[in-house]
């Protein structure tokens, strides 16, 4: 079993397969950024499969494919198929911005991806374009409709709640998700890099209570292994989650680590400590050495992030780390 130094079980990996993205969301990536990782530094599919097989033997159960935009990685359904077949991996999901989803929904489902998280911050075309710096809302909506027809176990809509930007659309997004059977998740902005710190932070606690009263929601639980606290309709027809890393952090139950596209295992989103697996994989190490590096790294996983105490400490931004 994968345990950190505080006795928390770590069974969830967010696996970034690329740092490229076809959007430029204002809270995620600086406009005009070109400092991408060299493709030669990306872990190959063989390296990823080998490393995750080691993780799974030690207790990893959940894997989420992320980016950047993971669907920009060539032949991603092939990697999904290989990971879904690994003994011990019983939940394979994917986070996407949705622009490529109409094309890839069916191959992903056939490869073994069972759940999708789709970033969608606005249903208004001009606001979407302003936030994402691309006029791509029609493609995202089309992709969601195709994905809905493919029978994924769940489709979650991730909406970053920003004061003065998306806060006015929360009720409209609730109505949209209710109508289509999507799970909605509202996410507080995190102060990662200048992009995250300049986004308008919105405390989701009062939003949660307002939506509870307006839609007659009650406390509930939605499977998935993530940190969201959920409200649900009494008849189970709708679920909305609140991810509150700043106003109400969930560090005491953290069960995840993040592997960036270049093979760096980030032990905490809000800290800089990491385990570098690429040099080990390309230096002829054994599986036992990979296991030892993972176990030693997990013992350094901190008790909690320090976003509140040191808001400017994390200079990397979200797309560099992995979603």
Image: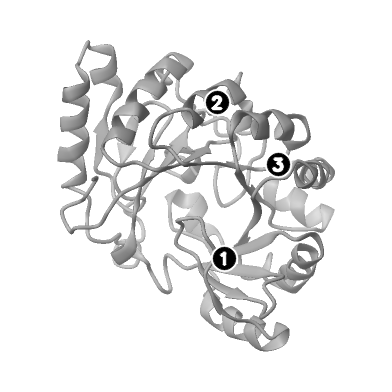
Which quarter of the rendered picture does the N terminus lie within?
top left
Front position in the image: 258 or 153: 153
Q: Which mark is residue 107?
A: none
**Of tags 2 and 1, which is closer to the observer?**
2
User: Which class describes the residues within 10 Å of circle 1: few (<14), some (14-19), or many (20+)?
Assistant: some
User: What is the CA distance from the residue labelled 1 to the residue labelled 3?
Assistant: 23 Å
Q: CA distance from mark 2 to mark 3?
A: 20 Å
| x, y percent for residue 7 | 19, 58
Res 23 visible: yes
Residue under the image location 20 percent in, 15 percent down: 285
CA gap, disc 2 and disc 1: 39 Å
Q: Residue at x 35, y 21 (%)?
A: 50
Q: Which of the two residues, 175 or 247, is positioned nearer the viewer here?
A: 175
Element type at mark 1: loop
Crowding near pointer 2: few (<14 within 10 Å), some, many (20+)? Answer: some
Q: Helix, strand, or loop for circle 2?
A: helix
Residue 170, position in %: x, y?
A: 71, 70
Mark found first going from the N terminus, 1 or 3: 3
> Between disc 2 and disc 3, whose residue precedes?
2
- Residue 194 in percent (x, y) is at 47, 51
Which of the 4 image quadrants contains residue 134? top right
Residue tagged by mark 1? 200
Measured from the top left, where is residue 191 in percent x and y?
43, 58
Callout 3: few (<14), some (14-19), or many (20+) C-alpha neighbours within 10 Å? many
Q: Please report whichever mark, 2 or 1, sits nearer to the chain's N-terminal start.
A: 2
Using residue 169 as the reference point, say whether residue 197 is left or right of it: left
- Residue 73 can be seen, yes or no: no
Q: Label 3 belongs to which residue?
A: 98
The residue to which callout 2 is attached is: 81
Mark nearest the camera among 1 and 3 is 3
Residue at 80%, 44% (x, y): give it: 149
């Amino acid at each position: 079993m994968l345990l950190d130094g505080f006795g928390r079980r770590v069974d969830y990996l967010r696996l970034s397969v690329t740092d490229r993205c076809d959007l430029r969301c204002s809270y995620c990536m600086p406009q005009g950024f070109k400092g991408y990782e060299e493709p030669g530094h990306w872990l190959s599919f063989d390296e990823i499969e080998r490393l995750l097989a080691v993780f799974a033997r030690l207790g990893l159960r959940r894997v989420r494919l992320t980016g950047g935009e993971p669907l920009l990685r060539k032949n991603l359904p092939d990697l999904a198929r290989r990971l879904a077949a690994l003994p011990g991996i019983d939940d394979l999901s994917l986070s996407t911005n949705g622009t490529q989803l109409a094309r890839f929904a069916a191959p992903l489902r056939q490869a073994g991806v069972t759940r999708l998280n789709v970033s969608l911050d606005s249903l208004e075309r001009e606001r979407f374009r302003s936030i994402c710096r691309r006029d791509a809302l029609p493609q995202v909506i089309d992709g969601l409709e195709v994905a809905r027809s493919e029978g994924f176990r769940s489709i979650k809509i991730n909406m970053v709640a920003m004061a003065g930007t998306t806060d006015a659309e929360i009720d409209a997004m609730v109505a949209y998700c209710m109508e289509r059977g999507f799970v909605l998740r509202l996410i507080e902005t995190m102060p990662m890099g200048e992009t995250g710190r300049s986004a308008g932070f919105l405390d989701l606690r009062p939003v949660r209570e307002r939506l509870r009263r307006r839609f007659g929601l009650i406390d509930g639980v939605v499977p998935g292994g993530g940190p969201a606290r959920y409200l649900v309709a009494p008849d189970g027809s709708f679920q909305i989650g609140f991810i509150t890393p700043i106003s109400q952090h969930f560090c005491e139950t953290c069960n995840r680590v993040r592997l960036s596209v270049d093979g760096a295992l980030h032990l905490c989103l809000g800290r800089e400590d990491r385990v570098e697996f690429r040099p080990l994989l390309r230096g002829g190490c054994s599986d036992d050495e990979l296991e030892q590096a993972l176990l030693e790294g997990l013992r350094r996983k901190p008790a909690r992030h320090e976003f509140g105490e040191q808001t400017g400490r994390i200079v990397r931004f979200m797309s560099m780390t992995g979603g």
